Image (spheres, grey):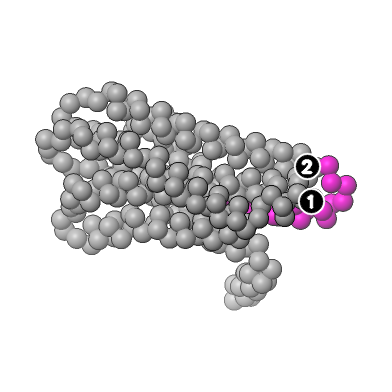
Amino acid sequence: MYILLANFSFLEIWYVTSTVPNMLANLLSETSTISFYGCFLQFYFFFSMGTTETFFLSAMAFDRYLAVCRPLHYPTVMTVQRCIRIGAGCWVSGFSCFLLPVYLISQLPFCGPNTIDHFLCDPGPLMKLSCVPAPATETICAVYNSVLIFSTFLFITSCYTLVIRAVLRVPLAEGRRKAFSTCGSHLAVVSLFYGSIMVMYVSPTAGNPTGIQKIVTLFYSVMTPLFNPLIYSLRNKEMKKALRKLLMCGKMT
């Protein structure tokens, strides 16, 4: 679990780094510009790391399934070597998936004005800048997003359905509480991440170029990575005690 979590934390750092520095520079600058190649590099790295995150969340869900439903087999199945291979597979798969969409969108003719109504190079606003309609590229990107999001989400949901069934069979309340606490932080992270990206890329508002789209993107690209360390830290007993002391001090003052 900790090998996967360490990879996930490292991924979150670079996930935020791919967009936030440029976004802050644009906010502080009078001329908010980005080069053609810089835009597509941001597009590739941001969505590749987002895709890698979906694979890591799936791997962590499978890890929790084995720990709760197959505890006796867990040490032999999830060995250190296998965890490293799973982590490497998530990285390679994540950075391979978006090569085709990035290539297809980069080949579209852009004749100006090349003004993106967004704070990052998102595929929707980018395709709107094309001089000619590109229904085939739009369809491929939509299928890519839907298959990726739904396949990983269904896998995670299946794992946790089995986990919940196994936990409810535990006769002792203390055992059920420990099992749910083991999975609670990961479920919270999955809910935050998938809830926002489904609103953005699967729901009918996905094609809406209004401020709502920017707010949702800001949530899953900045706020969710900010919340994730706090969510996982609350599993630590010392962190819980420190938080209780902080809240008590706040009430007393």
Disc 2: which residue: 166
Is 15 covered by the magenta stretch?
A: no
Is 174 covered by the magenta stretch?
A: yes
Disc 1: which residue: 72
- Label 1 residue SS: loop
- Indicate which disc, 1 or 2, sits on the residue closer to the N terminus: 1
Judge from the rendering whether residue 56 lies leftward or rightward of residue 108; answer left or right.
right
- Residues packed near mark 2 inside 10 Å, few (<14), some (14 to 19) or many (20 plus): some
83 versus 105 height, above or below: below
Judge from the rendering whether residue 82 lies leftward or rightward of residue 49; answer left or right.
right
Q: What residue type is labelled 2?
A: Ala
Quadrant placement of the C terminus: bottom right
- Is 224 in front, or is 142? 142
Which residue lies at the image location 24% right of the left edge and 42% below the top edge?
A: 117
Q: Give the range drawn in magenta.
A: 169-189
- Where residue 229 appears, as percent x and y from the top left, is 53, 61
81 versus 252 height, above or below: above
Quadrant placement of the N terminus: bottom right
Which residue lies at the image location 15% right of the left edge and 56% below the top edge?
A: 31
**Quadrant in the rendering for residue 26:** bottom left
Give the CA distance from mark 1 to mark 2.
14 Å
- Where residue 180 appears, as percent x and y from the top left, is 72, 51
- Residues packed near mark 1 inside 10 Å, few (<14), some (14 to 19) or many (20 plus): few
Q: What residue type is labelled 1?
A: Leu
Contact between labelled residues 2 and 1, with CB atoms less than 8 Å apart: no
- Where residue 91 appears, as percent x and y from the top left, is 46, 50
Which residue lies at the image location 59% right of the left edge and 37% below the top edge?
A: 155
